[in-house]
Structure formats: C-alpha cells, structure tokens
Amino acid sequence: MSSGSGGQQKTGEQTVTVRTASGQELAYPWATGVRVDRQGDLRVLQGLRQRAFHPCAEWASYTVKNLRSGQP
C-alpha cells in the first residue's frame, strides 16, 4: 500500500498519540518509539533521536497505533 487517494496509510507506519493533562491530544505520525523514564517523563523517538518531550506532570496517557497490515 502507498499513501495515495482515499487516505490510505503506508504499510509499516505507526502513530503515537499523547493526551496531555489538559486534555489536548498530540499526534506524532513519524514516531518510531516511546520511552518513559523513572521520573515519569515521556520521550517520543524517531529512530534513536528524541523528537518530543513531555514532563511527567504534563501528560496523562499515550497510545500507539501500529498500522501494519499483512505482516506475519
């Protein structure tokens, strides 16, 4: 699959969504990983690089949607 008309996503993509304490939802469609450290700080990664940071008091939850299809 490729991203073309119809809003289809490419195979192998995933999206990380972070819900802040204030209720705002922030989407990171380029994310390849998420880390939460011992202090509760959340880091959104692209490859090995940190691309977004949310201190413990700022975020309430996160979800990862893995959009892979047809993979064994």
Image: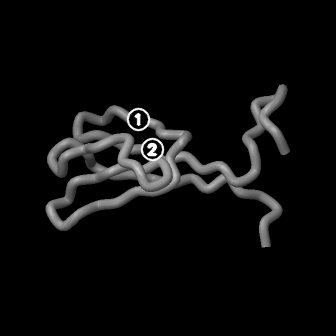
Using residue 28 as the reference point, say whether residue 13 is left or right of it: right
SS at mark 1 in the image: strand
Residue 60 in the image: above or below residue 71: above
For the residues labelled 1 and 2, say whether their Cβ atoms are less than 8 Å apart.
Answer: yes
Q: Mark 1 belongs to which amino acid?
A: Leu
Q: Earlier in the sequence, mark 1 or mark 2?
A: 2
When the figure is inspected, residue 63 is found, relative to residue 71, above or below; the finding is above
The residue under the point 70% across, 54% down is 12
Quarter of the image with the N terminus is top right
Name the kind of residue labelled 2 in the image. Thr
Give 57 or 55, whichever is nearer the viewer: 55
> How many numbered discs sit on the rendered protein?
2
For label 1, the residue is 26
Residue 35 occupies which quadrant of the picture?
bottom left
Mark seen at residue 44 = none
Residue 5 % position (x, y):
84, 26
The 10 Å Cα crowd at callout 1, few under 14, some 14 to 19, many 20 or more, is few
Q: Residues within 10 Å of mark 2 (few under 14, many from 20)?
A: some
Residue under pointer 2:
17
